[in-house]
Amino acid sequence: MDNPMSQNTYERQLPRDGEQNMSMFFDFGTAQELGDFQPSTTTQNQETASRGGIRVSLACIPCRSRHVKCGAEMPNCSRCLQDDKPCFYAKSRRGMRDRNAPRKKSPQGGKVSPVLGPQVFRDHNAMGYAIGTSSSGSYTGLSSETSLSPASSSLKSASPARLIDLYYNFFYKAHPFVLPRYYFFSRLENDPESLKHLRAVIQYIGSLYAPDIPSAEHKELALSQLDLPNMPPNGFTVQTLLLIAIVFHCDDEMDRAREVLDRAIYLALELRMNSREFANIERDPVLAESWRRTYWGLFVTDSMIAGITRAPSFMPPAYVIPRARTFAEYDDRDFEDETPIFSSFTYLVDLCRIFGSLLNLDQLSMKDRELAVANADAMLVNWKLHLPPEKRGVIDKDEQVDELLFQAQGLLQVLLIFIHRPLSRLAHSPIEKISRCAPPPSSLTSPPNPRTLWLHTRKTILAAETAIDLLALPCPLLNHTPLSACSFTLTTLACLSACCYVLEGQEWLRMRDRVRLGLGGLKAFGEVWGTSRRTEGETKRIARAVFEAGGTGEGSSGMSPETGQLVNSGDSVEQIGFGGAGDMMGGMEMGWEDLREMEYLGMLDRMGQQGQSRFSI
């Protein structure tokens, strides 16, 4: 298999003087929204015309803003192509053409055939992708308008390049495990056979974000691959299965999602995808990082689905991988004089480790559960307290939402609700059983401790408010992972319970607004994903039952969790108060602690700080 990039090429892609020392793959920043500029749609030759001297004034805007040298190639400079960033130039009254450059005409006059030949995807960049069919390499730049809604990103034709572009614009940032866009197109050109199955799934996902494109044919093509007996046992097949599992889950086909995800997990373990040997099989650092992300993407997705279905564990113990020293090094980071900054993906995986240790809480007695919840709360608080300042929010330095931190912060609040609500006054109503996305836990064998009801109630309310407020961030909701729909369902139900059993007056009104915000988020996800459409309807039914049963906020009355009848709710939120008793009790045994090769996450954002092309802690 051709290696699309040599070691020397990779070394040239390390941060240069004047640039920030960030990993190319983890926390590499968010590309600017293309709505800030108008991309050129002028038809040009693929063959670069020989240029006279390039004027310094032709430096592109991104290179100027970073104060780095620009190659000034048209339509996209080599540096922006290399970094997978949008490239655009300031408009000039005299135009953008170099007067010293000879003008060559394409043999086909720049026309593009609608039939995709072997030269498809020959040119690709962060703004547009060429579609050519002849050896002349003529192309037209297709604008990949990454506006804030799928409808406004529509073009006249459902070209493969456009569908892949939609995938990267709307889905990739929340699930960044396939090759980055530039490298995906590069491999698609050099070795299209290796991406045959994966490309079909990516194009199907892209079609979901364009209302003008019928997705039925793309779905049939993508899902038909599940029945193929000759899918190659390689990492791209694992990526294909993982994407299909996510699509199944978010399209309300939970059983099929679990089946396909298990298939992907077993294949990844059979390939030893977590090993250095597999990561370096092609000696391509970009591809190696993609394999590492895919392995941990399986871990994160498996934990999410296990939590939603309240499974006792992620995967059968026979498939747990022996622990290596690198996990201990990561866990000991808090004792170092200078705490290293790891990637956003690393903190998300660490939180999923904690999640794995909490899945058996429903099986504990009340006495054991109280202690386990105290320990779990300490673990979650520790996770938050030890985040570096750069990772405590969800907005990165470019004022864009870091989708992996968005998932992590949302999961943190969901886990706090998960552990505290069963021990609080925010009881589960019988009608909540209709929710497939956020079913209530099994009944407790004994009532919660009345002395700690206020603590667990307060923590649940604070977590629910914080989680719902994430939906109000100024960014398109469809850019978030569709897996978060069930998390927001669980959070919305906690807000409903607070309205029903605890809050009154202005606090009740504010919490009802958050219920509406949660329903609005589910509605937005429901424009694309079937699970969100179904769970929106279920949550609305529960909300109607709560509010029609007397949850008006005018008094301290609510619905009995056992009978559905109105009862006095007890303390208001002021009476609940807040305290930290037991917040920082001892740690809990880590679930999934046997996973190894943690350094494969490429954790340090400052990769290449010493000019080394490797991924390690």
Image (cartoon, rainbow, N blue to C red):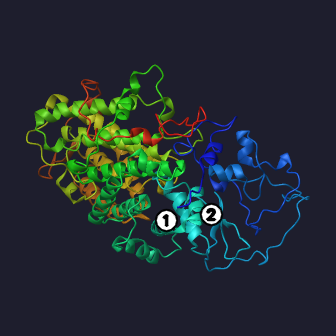
Q: Residues within 10 Å of mark 2 (few under 14, many from 20)?
A: many
Mark 1 and mark 2 in contact (Cβ < 8 Å)?
Answer: no
Q: Which of 552 and 426 is in front in this view?
A: 426
Q: Locate residue 232, reporting x and y percent.
A: 40, 66
Q: Which amino acid does label 1 sit on?
A: Ser
Q: Which of 145 and 510 is in front in this view?
A: 145
Residue at label 1?
Answer: 194
Q: What residue type is labelled 2?
A: Ser
Name of the residue lying farthest toward the left? 445
Q: For residue 108, what is the image quadrant?
A: bottom right
Q: For residue 597, what is the image quadrant?
A: top left
Q: Locate residue 219, reporting x and y percent.
A: 42, 73
* Vertical position of residue 196 compared to residue 601: above or below: below
Identify the residue shown where x is 47% and y is 30%.
388
Q: Earlier in the sequence, mark 2 or mark 1?
A: 2
* Vertical position of residue 546 compared to residue 612: above or below: below
Mark 2–mark 1 distance (CA, rounded to whole Å): 25 Å
Residue at label 2?
Answer: 144
Identify the residue shown where x is 34% and y is 49%.
299
185 relative to 109 in the view: left or right:
left
179 relative to 132 in the view: left or right:
left
